[in-house]
Amino acid sequence: MLRTDAFRLPGWVANAWKFGLRIFLSAGLLACGLAGTSSRAEDRVVAQSRPMPVGKAVPMAAGTATLISVESLPWVTNEYSARFRYDSADNPKLAALRQRHSLDAVVAPGKDEFQKQLLLMDWTHRQFRKFGKPTSDARGAAEILAGIEAGNTYFCAQYAQVLVSASASLGWVNRPLALRRHQGVAKVGGSTEHSVTEIWSNQHRKWVMLDPTSNLHVEKDGVPLNAVEIRQEWFYRGGSNLVFVAGSERKRYRKADLPIFVARMEGFGDLTFEPDEPDKYGFTAFIPNTDLMDSGYDYGKMFIVQDGLCDGTRWHERKVPAQPLVEPYFPIGQAALRILDEGGRVVVQIDTLTPNLARFEVRLDGGDWIERSARWVWDLRPGRNRMEARTVNRFGVTGPESGAVVEVGL
């Protein structure tokens, strides 16, 4: 059985996240615009460089340089990140979806990125008028939305497909998840399975679960949670710390407030979020592709978080991550920084896992953002030097900002 402490970040991972070190859990880079950014020649140069230690003065060509701090998400590649296939910015179906349904106007009222993402989930939820077993074999957001107009019925898997592709059309990475109850059936009947998504939030610098069928996300202490964090809190801590944030008004509910009325659906009745609905996180399966309008769900490469809670229940047999809160949760869109001492000069190396990467941008000492290569020499001046870095993808979405401070003394 997977113990509750198996959900905690191991020390070496926690330190990597703190200092922004480059983590290699397996070799290989990803396709579809994912950037591991140094060439073989650059790798040989980097191998001759030395990482600058934090807090220790290093001799430079003139004076000394001290790395005061580095704030950076790490560059993580592993066997699970390598399974993922992302929709391409060149896919004309994304542009058509974005334009046909005026998605820029849908998210425009949001005051920040996460509010915009929640507005997109709310829009997705409101497109569906009937709920139940699909009455057409529509595949992909465009076909599903056309099917809704034709009067067809759909359920959670189609909600997720629409949200994943609508997100991709706006430059956000949103991946589909399949859930299955760990034991038994729902107390009030209904399906034992469910479909949700996890969107990458640059604002919160993490993956966040979005449930477009119930039009909700889940928080703890004001921080939105991913699916496995919800699983941990629900099964191992009783769920009392969870806050279910639901509806267009983002009303907040506790466990004791369940069930939540979601919507009245034609031909179905009341759609509700029942008190035992989170039991469906018993099996939490990651479907590793977002190009759903072209490929559908890639169940073959799916992997599943499960443990002894699931004993006695048969479901799909797939690879199970040993560290469920770490291995599936590689950061994307990050500008992972390495600050290097290279023979009397300071060199900045930026690595990233960014689908549809367009460029890196850097800001020095609060100035303007300018484009920079993945590896460049930091021209330092006496005193304190501040550098910030970020990625920009081909949709114009900027990643979470990284930063470093170097003090130069003469």
Image (cartoon, rainbow, N blue to C red):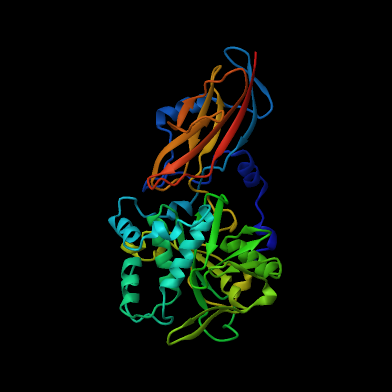
Most distant residue in the left direction: 92
Residue at the image point whose x is 53% and y is 57% from the top: 115
Question: Residue 209's spot in the image, x, y percent?
Answer: 54, 62
Closer to the camera, 15 or 216?
A: 216
- The quadrant of the image that shows the C terminus is top right
Closer to the camera, 63 or 247?
A: 247
Please identify the quarter of the rendering in which residue 102 is found: bottom left
Residue at the image point whose x is 48% and y is 38% from the top: 351
Residue at the image point whose x is 52% and y is 79% from the top: 192
* Left or right: 273, with 355 as reference point: right
Let me know if residue 178 appears in the view. Answer: yes
Question: Residue 388's spot in the image, x, y percent?
Answer: 54, 34
Looking at the rendered structure, the number of numbered marks drawn on it comes to 0
Q: Is residue 22 above or below residue 263?
A: above
Question: Residue 366's spot in the image, x, y percent?
Answer: 55, 31
Q: Is residue 29 above or below residue 42?
A: below
Let me know if residue 289 appears in the view. Answer: no
Residue at the image point whose x is 48% and y is 54% from the top: 80
- The quadrant of the image that shows the N terminus is bottom right
